[in-house]
Amino acid sequence: MTNKYFLLFLSFILIVPASFASDPLSSDGDDGYKLWLKYEAVANAAVKAEYLRYTSFIGESSKGEVAQSASRELHTGLKSLLGKNVPVLNSFGGKSGGIILKLESGTASSQQEEGYQIKLSGTNVVVSSNSERGILYGTFALLRHMQMQLPVKGLNLTSNPRVRYRMLNHWDNPDGTIERGYAGASLWKWYELPERVDPRYQDYARANASLGINGTVLNNVNASARFMSQEYIVKVAAIANVMRKYGIKTYLSVYFAAPKTLGGLPTSDPLDPKVRAWWAEKVAQIYKEIPDFGGFLVKANSEGEPGPQDYGRSHADGANMLAEAFKPYDGIVVWRAFVYKADPNADRFKAAYEEFVPLDGKFDPKVIVQVKNGPIDFQPREPFSPLFGNMPKTPLGMEFQITQEYLGFATHAVYEAPIFKECLDSDTYVNGAGSTVAKVVDGSLHGYTRTLMAGVANTGNARNWTGHPLAQANWYAFGRLSWDHQLSSEQIAREWTALTLTRNQKAGESIVRLMSRSREIYVDYNTPLGLSRPWMGVHFAPEPWQNKGSRPDWTAVYYHRADSVGLGFDRTESGSNALTQYRPQVQQQWNNPDKTALPYLLWFHHIRWDKKLSTGRTLWDELCTRLYTGADSVTWMQQQWDLAKTHLDPQVYTDVAQRLQVQHREAIWWRDSWVLYLQTFAKQPITAGFEPPKQTLDEVKKSVNVYLIR
């Protein structure tokens, strides 16, 4: 992620089909604003009768503001679902037939502070927890249960979060733009704060709390020092006041050189006493305004951002300095491991491992190192980062990207839960079979007590929050998996579809099929067989021929390495030897091209054009087949969407149908760019049965160039 193409990015967002008005207006149809919290009226008479039996009152045992949010949400949800006002009672004694929100110690749900239990007790439904946040999460879980019209009889559900810090990372800037944001401008109206607090902040908090998300980082990791000024601390405090009511802590990304640029010091050396004192005073200043402040997120010594290495210090030195400033408080420091050097002879794949593994055990207990799911940069498919499992003394947090930086922005439907699950379910073998990435992240493998899962947010000020209506499912899936990574992608897709689009079973099945295949279809026409990062610029237009950049790893040819012999990045012993960063059992999966699963083939091997693969086709023919069938499969996606048409809101149906038309056109654009470019190396005709592109390579290049200069 860089700012190199910032102006091009700004020009691009003007043509993405989403609302970019400063205050998008609602419409008569389903405009997507309510997300998965629509609480549509229960039409089934039998189900409604059962629910009415248990909803004569809402009893609450806590007057705390988070518990109050729970009772308000329950009142709102029941009124919409059942069409009646349900009174909220502070004293309910032996009353029966109600929903009781119960704050108590020692409940069955209390293995973790935020856990909850929902059970039927006589004719009362009891939502209990030993924390107000647990009551809130249990309330949303009960409403989710009722929205899906599931029975109350026999209800006995206990749930605990598997990860302690479940947060969104916003890449929002002070000027209202969002780096890698494709749903409009920032939600945060800094020019209005702190005097005016947009009501939308509360709906954002509700949506996150409904998924169990308990933290939000408000600003870009390419941070501005302005956020450390008193002017902005007060603005952040106004947002934090809203988030707090929904159990959400507020965090900030920090600019490491702020002591110089903002504080006027001659240095930002983390070992300098004056620098350490500056940060301690700054943290104290923040806590004075925000007593439950969550902490700092830091991108340092990466892509030109300043950091401790500027002074000959390590990442641990920088992180520990900030952690020291948080000693009197409950906050944490989240230090990103996304680093790589501009070395033409290096493999960017190896960079984070080489810098961070030697520092294992040297980080302060308040520090969590946040690692991207893969070793490069949020590609459509990546092997899991080799850092997972190789830093047993350091808590490692997961960083997923929800916004679709390399997944077609707001014009391509790509359901990301399979990407998240593919990584979480990968086995590191660090302690033998079953040592999954998920067990590293949730702390169970190494005994971490501070655990984290972060998602780069895909929200903007578009009325439907995410630009593409189906992209809401990615926000939803991240939240659900950060609470419980054992949920399946399909289960989450079914939930989201029923809550958001339609309760009709046949229509829902069609949409779930579309969602479940969407990622593989995208990979086939975009990066088949393990190709990675084939485009630069605004990370959208196909440029596999791009070979000019201020550094080699900011070119496309660095990654795919196409030549007259073949294609792919050799990361075995004969190449960069990146495979040695994994345990032997993992290496065995990928070190032999004849045994490497095809989705990862070109990640780890440079393969001859004429080599016959396990499918019986040569590499060239397999690439053609996947690129063509991938693009053609978007037509299948359109058909699946059309099957659900009569059970969808017309506005939602039309919006997605039109975006699928764009996706089909752009899938062909990607297909033609790849086959025509690679054909110059393979020197082979398009595989029999597929129609050659209508344009020449030069014509395709011109179309890309025109796109980039808009």
Image: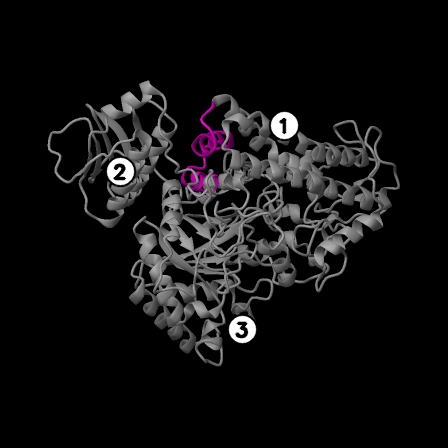
Q: Are marks 2 and 3 in contact (CB under 8 Å)?
A: no
Q: Quadrant of residue 674?
A: top right
Please give the residue where the numbered disc 3 appears in the rendered image: 311
Residue 478: x and y, percent? 47, 42
Q: CA distance from mark 2 to mark 3?
A: 56 Å
Q: Give the magenta-colored segment's residue range.
A: 477-504
Residue 557: x and y, percent? 75, 52
Task: Identify residue type, mark 2.
Answer: His
Disc nearer the start of the sequence (1/2): 2
Q: Quadrant of residue 526?
A: top right
Q: Residue at x 54, y 37 (%)?
A: 427
Q: CA distance from mark 3 to mark 1?
A: 58 Å
Viewport quadrant of the C terminus = bottom right
Give the residue at the far top of this rendering: 46
Q: Is residue 431 above or below residue 266?
A: above
Disc 3 vs disc 1: which is toward the camera? 1
Q: Which mark is residue 639?
A: 1
Please give the residue where the numbered disc 2 appears in the rendered image: 75
Q: Residue at x 31, y 23 (%)?
A: 48
